[in-house]
Amino acid sequence: MTEVLSPLAGTTVAMSEAPDQLFAEERIGAGVAIDPGSVPQQVLAPIDGRLLKIHPHAFVIMGGKVGILVHLGIDTVRLKGEGFTVLAEEKSTVTAGTPVIEWDPTAADDAGYSTLVLVVHMESEPGSVLQPEPGTDVAPGDPLFTVA
């Protein structure tokens, strides 16, 4: 069992509310959406593992056979790194809670992009993650869901 922790502070939102059909329909995998508000904060590794890929707006971490995608906002790739600072190195091994990216969501908000953060168990079946009740406040490191 792998416990997936919240990578940042915010309030949970139903994944189906994500303004991108790939995420809303859980075609990439099941997961949890978090509204981070507008406060700049560090985004932490949600599990122990190896950082397979890091972009300013997203990263993938592999822990054993569990792959987790953390995607910061929707269409934020178009910001070309504005509002993001990468803190960790691609291919490095990290523990849950290690800072990976520092993010100021106001850059995305000012550009008209959604700031929802999507924490996705990659390649899992839709509905396979028990989501917290929408509107639940989470702090960095709080348990989000468990992967068998």
Image (cartoon, rainbow, N blue to C red):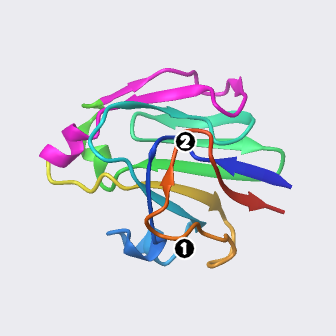
How packed is label 2: few (under 14 Cα within 10 Å), some, or many (20 or more)? many
Along the line of sight, the residue nearer the viewer: 145 or 138? 138
Bounds of the magenta segment: 84-110
Residue 98 lies, in percent from the top left, at 62, 26
Eye-nearest disc, 1 or 2: 2
Quarter of image, res 135: bottom left
Count of numbered marks: 2
Residue 54 belongs to magenta span: no
Residue at 58%, 58% in the rendered image:
120
Residue at 32%, 69% in the rendered image:
19
Q: In which quarter of the image is the N terminus?
A: bottom right
Which residue bears the numbered disc 1? 27
Residue 70's tag is none
In what element is the residue under mark 1? loop
Residue 107 belongs to magenta span: yes
In what element is the residue under mark 2? loop
Return the disc, 1 or 2, that comes first in the chain's sequence: 2
Which residue bears the numbered disc 2? 7
How packed is label 1: few (under 14 Cα within 10 Å), some, or many (20 or more)? some
Query: Is the Cβ of the residue at disc 1 closer than 8 Å to that at disc 2?
Result: no
| In-image side of 10 versus 122 (left or right) | left
The amino acid type found where label 2 is placed reads Pro
Rounded to the nearest whole Å, what is the CA distance between mark 1 and mark 2?
A: 21 Å
Q: Quadrant of the C terminus?
A: bottom right
The amino acid type found where label 1 is placed reads Arg
Residue 99 lies, in percent from the top left, at 55, 26
Residue at 55%, 41% in the rendered image:
7
Residue 39 lies, in percent from the top left, at 30, 36
Residue at 63%, 79% in the rendered image:
127
Residue 104 lies, in percent from the top left, at 29, 33
| In-image side of 77 versus 53 (left or right) | left
Along the line of sight, the residue nearer the viewer: 57 or 147? 147
